[in-house]
Image (spheres, rainbow, N blue to C red):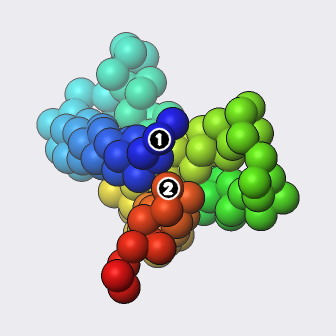
Amino acid sequence: MRYPILLVGASVLAAAALGAWLRFGLVEPQAVALACVGEDGLACQLRALTIASFQRQALSWAGLLLVLVSGLWGLTQSGAGGAGRVFGIVLLIVGAALGALGALLYGPEPGVAAALAALWLASSRQGGAKNCGA
């Protein structure tokens, strides 16, 4: 994974698009809410699961936790390559995606913090921070 910031950025954009669709296409429309009264279809189950996931900002906090664990993992794996580095970047990507998804699903503070921290960590891991002042 040579450019982790591209992977993290792509995961943030994809998760934000999914979050926007879930929020504005499934959760907020009154017609969908009224159609789901007494219904047990797949869309209604997905809507109920989405509502349950954002009631305590669970997605945003999980994303922030994964980004923090990835940052700590990177500190313990400094100079190491291979599977340890890949695992840290995967944690970072998943955390960023959960943060972006949670930010659009009514958990903006921890979600945006997770996405921004993930982008910053990815930038520093690929060496982008070294070239900023040159």
Along the line of sight, which residue is nearer the eye, 47 or 97?
Answer: 97
Residue 49 is at least partly visible in this image: yes
Query: Disc number at residue 2?
Result: 1
Which residue does the numbered mark 2 point to in the structure image?
Answer: 126
Is 95 above or below relative to 119?
above
Is 50 above or below relative to 12?
above
Q: How many marks?
A: 2
Q: Residues within 10 Å of mark 1 (few under 14, many from 20)?
A: few
Q: Residues within 10 Å of mark 2 (few under 14, many from 20)?
A: some
Circle nearer the N terminus (2, 1): 1
Distance between the alpha carbons at the discs numbered 2 and 1 = 7 Å
The amino acid on which the numbered mark 1 sits, given as a three-letter code, is Arg
Q: Quadrant of residue 65 in the image?
A: bottom right
Along the line of sight, which residue is nearer the eye, 36 or 98?
Answer: 98
- Residue 121 location (% of width, % of height): 54, 64
- Residue 20 location (% of width, % of height): 24, 47
Along the line of sight, which residue is nearer the eye, 72 or 57?
Answer: 72
The amino acid on which the numbered mark 2 sits, given as a three-letter code, is Gln
Residue 132 located left or right of residue 120:
left
Residue 57 located left or right of residue 6:
right
Assess whether mark 1 and mark 2 are in contact (beta carbons under 8 angstroms): yes
Which residue is at the far bottom? 133
- Residue 34 location (% of width, % of height): 24, 35
Residue 128 located left or right of residue 21:
right
